Image (tube, helix red, strand yellow):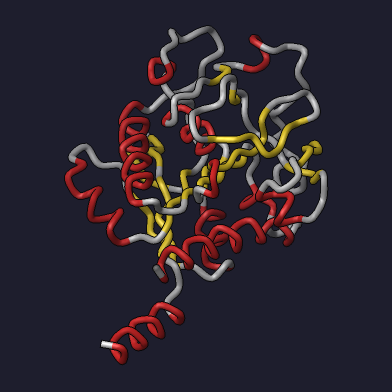
């Protein structure tokens, strides 16, 4: 038994973490594609993991098998979340919505939480974590919080757009060892009321939540910006994915 345990441990030590990556629809004139931005895949590979895309499926009976396969999951950016998911009616300014994606990702979130799998939410992914844990969103920042700074800048996505303040002892402060970092911004929604078992660990200068993590050391992390889209110009943002994969690796070794 001891030899078997050592062999299994050695296999775990050399096997990269397998990371699930959520996907979205893209509608073309004659077909509908299921896809994710290549930057998510590149980030996982460069950080030392094995990416596995989780497709949108109308019959979700096989989702459990995906969750049994992976060591952690990344909820990616994309369309707005249906306001009914957090108890609101839609307002003017709400963007495109994919109800199938909302439903599937909320199920995946529940499954990940049940398994204590490490979770990373990026942009919409952070918002999904918040909604799935009982929080709410600003549906449209420009109309609901016009006093806030601008949070959409497409041309500067690879380089950064504004500073965010990092909370002491939060995961981003641990990663970067700074009290602020310069990030990109590509969202018109944001966290209004924080979800259960989450704590905010970074803020924009206008007070909007820019990062969250689980309380009591739960391996739940979310960022409102897109670190994967900055890697070609700002290599330091790979540290976020390396940190996350480190948490997945620890979970794999248990």
Q: Residue at x 80, y 28 (%)?
A: 205
Coordinates of residue 31 in the picture (x, y in percent): 31, 39
Coordinates of residue 130 in the picture (x, y in percent): 50, 30
Rendering quarter of residue 83: top left
Residue 174 seen in render:
yes
Q: Residue at x 39, y 68 (%)?
A: 254
Rendering quarter of residue 233: bottom right
The N terminus is located in which quarter?
Answer: bottom left
Vertical position of residue 92 compared to residue 106: above or below:
above
- Relative horizontal placement of residue 150, taking residue 11 as reference (left or right): right
Residue placed most toward the observer, 54 or 135: 135
- Relative horizontal placement of residue 243, taking residue 220 as reference (left or right): right
Residue placed most toward the observer, 107 or 117: 117
Coordinates of residue 78 in the picture (x, y in percent): 50, 35
Coordinates of residue 225 in the picture (x, y in percent): 65, 40
Name the residue furthest bottom: 3
Vertical position of residue 99 compared to residue 177: above or below:
above
Q: Residue at x 39, y 61 (%)?
A: 71
Vertical position of residue 166 compared to residue 175: above or below:
above
Residue placed most toward the observer, 201 or 236: 201
- Relative horizontal placement of residue 206, taking residue 210 as reference (left or right): right
Residue 31 seen in render:
no
Vertical position of residue 211 compared to residue 233: above or below:
above
């Amino acid at each position: 038994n001891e030899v078997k345990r050592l062999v299994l441990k050695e296999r775990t030590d050399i096997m990269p973490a397998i990371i699930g990556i959520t996907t979205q629809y893209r509608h073309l004139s004659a077909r509908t594609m299921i896809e994710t931005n290549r930057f998510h895949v590149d980030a996982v590979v460069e950080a030392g993991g094995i990416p596995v895309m989780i497709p949108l499926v109308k019959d979700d009976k096989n989702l459990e098998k995906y969750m049994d396969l992976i060591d952690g999951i990344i909820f990616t950016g994309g369309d707005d979340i249906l306001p009914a998911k957090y108890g609101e009616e839609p307002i003017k300014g709400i963007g495109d919505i994919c109800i199938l994606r909302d439903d599937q990702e909320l199920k995946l979130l529940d499954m990940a939480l049940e398994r204590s799998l490490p979770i990373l939410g990026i942009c919409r992914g952070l918002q999904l974590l918040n909604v799935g844990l009982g929080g709410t969103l600003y549906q449209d920042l420009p109309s609901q919080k016009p006093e806030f700074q601008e949070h959409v800048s497409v041309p500067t996505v690879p380089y950064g757009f504004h500073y965010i303040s990092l909370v002491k002892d939060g995961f981003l402060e641990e990663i970067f060892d700074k009290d602020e970092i310069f990030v990109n911004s590509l969202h018109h929604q944001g966290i209004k009321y924080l979800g259960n078992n989450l704590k905010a660990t970074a803020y924009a200068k206008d007070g909007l939540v820019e990062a969250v993590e689980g309380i009591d050391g739960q391996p739940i992390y979310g960022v409102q910006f897109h670190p994967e889209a900055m890697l070609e110009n700002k290599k330091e943002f790979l540290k976020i994915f390396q940190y996350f994969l480190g948490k997945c690796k620890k979970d794999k070794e248990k």
